Image: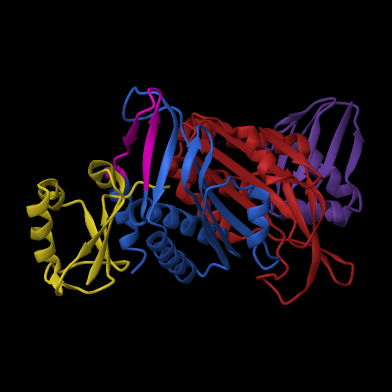
Chain colours: A yellow, B purple, C red, D blue
Amino acid sequence: MNITLKYFSWIRVKLKKSHDLIELNQTISFKELKNNLISKDPVFQEIFEDKSIKYFLNLTEIDDDNQTLNNGDILAFLPPVTGG
Amino acid sequence: MNITLKYFSWIRVKLKKSHDLIELNQTISFKELKNNLISKDPVFQEIFEDKSIKYFLNLTEIDDDNQTLNNGDILAFLPPVTGG
Amino acid sequence: MIKIINDNFDLETEFKFVSSNTNGAYSFFLGTVRSDLSSSNKKIKGIYLECYEELALAQLSKIRSKAISSWKLNECLIIHRIGKLDLGEKIVLVITASSHRAKAIEACEFVIDSLKIDVAFWKFHLLDNDEKETVLQKNLDNEKMLKWKDIIN
Amino acid sequence: MIKIINDNFDLETEFKFVSSNTNGAYSFFLGTVRSDLSSSNKKIKGIYLECYEELALAQLSKIRSKAISSWKLNECLIIHRIGKLDLGEKIVLVITASSHRAKAIEACEFVIDSLKIDVAFWKFHLLDNDEKETVLQKNLDNEKMLKWKDIIN
């Protein structure tokens, strides 16, 4: 299964990319994905420790780390917004 | 001496004119002018009894009936405003 | 800038007069001629606006200065139209310019609230039967103005 | 109407989209690119606006609906620009249309306050040395939003 990660603002700048396509063999929880990403790149440690960042799964904010991610899901990393 | 009276809104409509030129032999107080006008036309009785009307002498609101009117003065009759 | 005019005006053009790189926030209030009257069932086909122009200019100037000093505005523009206006036409425009959004918004509301009760304009409804009807001042406008007494001195 | 666009827009044209004879009061908030930064002494030559467009449209739509229902608005238009913008350029426009002045003004402030903290836009300063600097969210904006909790539920 595939999950698309979308990065915005300073996260995009820091990672030097706007998105990633993650391929997995089975469904995974948001918490498991976090650990997965940290093990691949320690910069994610910093990101996940920043409590100001919000995570949106298919345009809805994630409020439970145990939420399951499914094939085709889009997970967005959102630093505090600064529009207007 | 001459005093110009300016009428606005329903007062102008009621009097069917926008202004009057009053000729006087001597200076006069606002109170005396009021009595003067009422004696000439009883419609001024109704006007002066309406406490919502404001009187501006040379663009400044009159707050004292004993104020003296001088040659060349412009006295305006202002019903409550309704602009905007 | 204060203007009392007969002609219609263009919002983009008027904005350019107050626009500057040091601002960042602009609040506009635009009043237009409504077809339905809240106070009655009568139909109107427009309005007529009367003005004591020398006095209105002086009164608007005072309100504008008070708004600029109280909210530290960079600019404040007031345009009010006079004469005959059709349904939907613009009557009044207030633009306040500031570096701070909340200040621009509050000052703009102060200006239009003040204008409604303190400036020498009078409205007439032009009725379908060609009569002119004097518009009466709303108590609500007077009451709304009271809130500014605590903010402005 | 909600638009997320690169191009500049014209205020008079946008007003015509929301204009109707049944309104009478329009409140506009216009945000533009400021040359002086309140937070630092750095000079900027413009900004870059990033957006998660699908999400931003959904978030703006929710804010717009809330404003319309809470203040019984007749219309509400929101335009936000994205991409590179020069000093003084328009960033955001909110127009609320109502038959009542106070409602239009309050609703307009609610929309821009909500947009500032709840919609997926991110600003970068384009510095004179060609660097991009991430703009940080203002605490003030979050605090200002709290006042709406009592008004809107």
* Quarter of the figure with residue C84: bottom right
- Number of marks in picture: 0
The one of C100 and A61 positioned closer to us in this rendering:
A61
Query: Left or right of D146: which side holds C134?
Result: right
Is residue B51 in view? no
Asked if the magenta segment contains residue D134, the reply would be: yes
Note whether D77 is above or below C152 in the view shown.
below
- Quadrant in the picture for the C terminus of chain D: bottom left
Q: What residue is shown at x 30% (from left), y 69% (from top)?
A: A58
Asked if the magenta segment contains residue D129, the reply would be: yes
The one of D22 and C65 positioned closer to us in this rendering:
D22
Query: Left or right of C74: which side holds C42?
Result: right
In the rendered image, residue B2, in percent from the top left (x then y), is placed at: 89, 29
- Quadrant in the picture for the N terminus of chain D: bottom right
Range covered by the magenta-colored residues: D122-140
Residue occupying the far bottom of the picture: C41
Q: What residue is shown at x 88% (from left), y 53% (from top)?
A: B15
Is residue B10 in view? yes
The one of D4 and C148 positioned closer to us in this rendering:
D4
Note whether C6 is above or below A23 in the view shown.
above
The one of C146 and D80 positioned closer to us in this rendering:
D80
Note whether A3 is above or below C22 in the view shown.
below
Q: What residue is shown at x 67% (from left), y 61% (from top)?
A: D19
In the rendered image, residue C109, in percent from the top left (x then y), is placed at: 52, 48
In the rendered image, residue D73, in percent from the top left (x then y), is placed at: 54, 67
In the rendered image, residue D90, in percent from the top left (x then y), is placed at: 53, 42
